[in-house]
Amino acid sequence: MKANRRLERLLRLDPAECRERLRALSEEERRELRWHWRLWARPEQLPPAGDWRTWLIMAGRGFGKTRAGAEWVRALADADPAARIALVTASLGEARAVMVEGESGLLAICPPGREPSFEPSLRRLTWPNGAQATLYSAQEPESLRGPQHSHAWCDEIAKWENANGRAERAWDNLQLGLRLGEQPRLVATTTPRAVPLLRRLLKDEAIAVSHGPTAHNADNLPARFLRDMRRAYGRSLLARQELDGELIADLPGALWTRGLIEECRETAAASPPVRTVIGVDPPASARGDACGIVVCALGEDGVARLLADASVPRPSPERWARAVARAARVWQADRVVAEANQGGAMVASLLRAADVALPLMLVHAGRGKSARAEPVAALYEAGRVRHCGPFPALEDELCGLTAGGGYEGPGRSPDRADALVWALTELMLKRRTEPRVVMA
């Protein structure tokens, strides 16, 4: 459009002259300003120069990654009626809710009259000029085997489930089908997590990478949100990853690595539970650390699963006891296993006061945290534990435990990780005496 060409020229002017020219714009051009992304975008939200095939935007939450990906797709569709674009994310529900219908999704950012039509049953967007985009789920890698595309936008690739290498298979199938047009290209937007797919991409020197923290988008975020997040998380590993967009590497000698945890993840329990145990690591004082409260179940398939992290930060004794009792009722726990090193009688009385019928077992730590955790980490290595969903705070603590007794994770103590270790030890590592017939 003629208006678009004039607005593009504004980008090459110095600020004073740009303001002068803006005053002289026609009414049509002023209306177009709102939709002219290059005028409003920050440099790291715009495609980099050079002959790249993959552009990775790895940044903190609220940085504007989704908007950058959607605007890139819109520009492609507007410029090329033959564009065939794949939109891939963790699930079809997320693709629709975020990439298509979200506040920064494709329907919201297109000017009136130029937005695509959306056919949910066909998972397809069609622009007025004929360009098309199709939604795919990374949970179904085989759905990307066969279709051809000229471009692709992959959202939150660090969230893609990688059980049995699913995330990497989805990526590879997409790459093999990216063969239409003169210059096939792909944009991946994500908050960083040290998962195998993201680590693999960052080793490729041909990939163009943009970084940035949440704070770079401060003008478009509530000031209270930024303040509250910093107050709550400070410079913790979680803040560095989720707010600063920093990829947290594995510690030398860590008992758990992020790649190992990702390999053990599933979206929902694949087997019914036969036993459910709640592990509890009580705080030493009311002003101390969190109370670790973790729910684990042993499935009919012999695999243990982490179902919930109900931990409570800096609670009063009554509050954490009520949280344990509530979790036991919600998950219909067979047993609550609580560490009693900080006063067994007090722990028992608090929990009994919260729920008289609580099936309680007190345990005492005779070894250090890492020594207790090592056999549990071995269960992960053997594929005998699954995480049903993401548990970032707990997983940060697991990855901070190192062989030899060290802890270099967030907080002063791995309360959530301790609770997990107690629960899995009870479920998987306790020897159970079975009845047997003794022959005379």
Image (cartoon, rainbow, N blue to C red):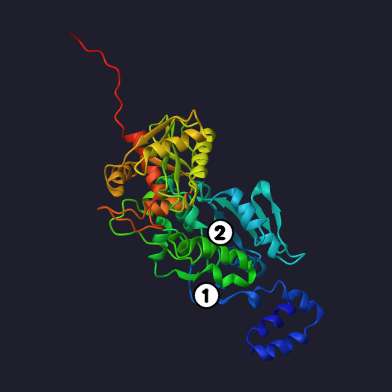
| Figure quadrant of residue 89 | bottom right
- Residue extending farthest to the top is 440
In the shown orientation, is residue 128 left or right of residue 362?
right
Up the image or down, 273 lies above or below 239; here it is above
Q: Nearer the viewer, residue 440 or 7?
A: 440
Question: Which secondary structure, mark 2?
Answer: loop
Up the image or down, 321 lies above or below 190; here it is above
Q: Nearer the viewer, residue 308 or 114?
A: 308
Q: Give neighbour class at mark 1: few <14, some 14-19, many 20+ (Cα, 10 Å).
A: few
Disc 1 to disc 2: CB gap under 8 Å: no
Q: Disc 1 to disc 2, how far (Cα)?
A: 21 Å
Q: Can you give x and y, in whole percent of width and height, for residue 185 in the image?
A: 52, 66
Q: Nearer the viewer, residue 182 or 156?
A: 156
- Residue extending farthest to the right is 27
Question: Which secondary structure, mark 1?
Answer: loop
In the shown orientation, is residue 213 left or right of residue 98?
left
- Residue 175 visible? The answer is yes
In the shown orientation, is residue 196 left or right of residue 102?
left
| Figure quadrant of residue 421 | top left
- Residue 169 visible? The answer is no
Q: Give neighbour class at mark 2: few <14, some 14-19, many 20+ (Cα, 10 Å).
A: many
In the shown orientation, is residue 63 left or right of residue 209?
right
The residue singled out by tag 2 in the image is: 149
The residue singled out by tag 1 in the image is: 48
Q: Can you give x and y, in whole percent of width and height, for residue 80 in the image?
A: 64, 68
